[in-house]
Amino acid sequence: MMPRTFTNVALLVALVVPIAATAQTSATRDADCPSCAEWNAPQRPFRIYGNTYWVGTHGLGAILITSPQGHVLIDGGLPESAPDILASIRAIGFRVQDVKLILNSHAHWDHAGGIATLQRVSGAAVAASPWSAKVLSRGASLPDDPQYGVVREYAAVRNVRAIADGDTLRVGPLALVAHFTGGHTPGGATWPGRPCEGARCLEVVYADSQTPVSADDFFFTRGNRYPSVIADFQHGFAVLESLPCDVLLTPHPDASKLWQRLAARGAGNPDALVEAGACKAYAGAARAGLKQRIASEGRR
């Protein structure tokens, strides 16, 4: 069955508003995750451009890239996000069993927690950077993670393939190149794509988080838990500044102002998701954030 397209303006505007939330699980009610309910608010799926779709929740990204020979899914949200992601894939007319490969931005529970379920239901292979592959296989982070001791554990993922920076991963005609953009975690990855509609193609970049967030006992400027953290951030910034980038997407959609842009598209601007220089601006803001964090550590 061919996927539905959303052409009605009122429907496009409605996509920006999350579906009325269902009863939350005990996990989302836990006091140690005040953001989980907001992150996991359901969201109607929609086409980003061409063969690329948003199938995540309202607060967490999950990107489906489709082809007649199989699909690629990037990110799996929270553990409790998996049913909504599966439902979204089906709602736009695709079979979950045709997802052949699952990729990841970074292996924290809010972006990888649902991958074990998504893998089990779809039968897809899973591939990640070497560090993320270890974390996914354990279902628990490692001591060199800046947020070690803060991030939650989740169901372990089976048979994760470790890939190298610059590797090309293929499913049928789809070819995705891994760009490692560490710092937020030692194993972060950014995934660019080039979907087309007719003769027009756009460079769509799913850029990993670039924020220097950490547990209270982690220092970016000193300590030996993750000695290359600043260099990894700087490398990631340079990657994002160099990538062709017409449409920026991020694991937390607010970081790329997705909902404001989608509202503008629904209001009559078909190119509202397109912004030249969006990836450079994203990297620039991240540079400023890291600089501020480094300065704050000098006062501690």
Image: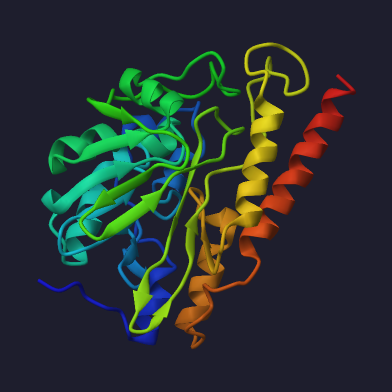
Is residue 136 visible in the rendered structure shown here?
yes
276 in relation to 70, above or below: below
Residue furthest out toward the right: 299
Is residue 56 visible in the rendered structure shown here?
no
Task: Find residue 279 and report its horizontal and vertical position in percent.
Answer: 62, 59
The quadrant of the picture occupied by the N terminus is bottom left
Task: Find residue 9 and report its horizontal and vertical position in percent.
Answer: 39, 86
99 in relation to 133, above or below: below
**Displayed quadrant of residue 172:** bottom left
Q: Considering depth in this image, is 83 or 219 the residue closer to the camera?
A: 219
The quadrant of the picture occupied by the C terminus is top right
Q: Is residue 218 left or right of residue 164?
A: right
At x 34%, y 59%, the residue is 20
Task: Find residue 223 and report its horizontal and vertical position in percent.
Answer: 72, 12
At x 35%, y 21%, the residue is 139
At x 16%, y 66%, the residue is 93
Task: Find residue 118 and report its horizontal and vertical position in percent.
Answer: 22, 40
At x 41%, y 31%, the residue is 109
Q: Is residue 131 left or right of residue 73?
A: right
Q: Considering depth in this image, is 123 or 192 the residue closer to the camera?
A: 192
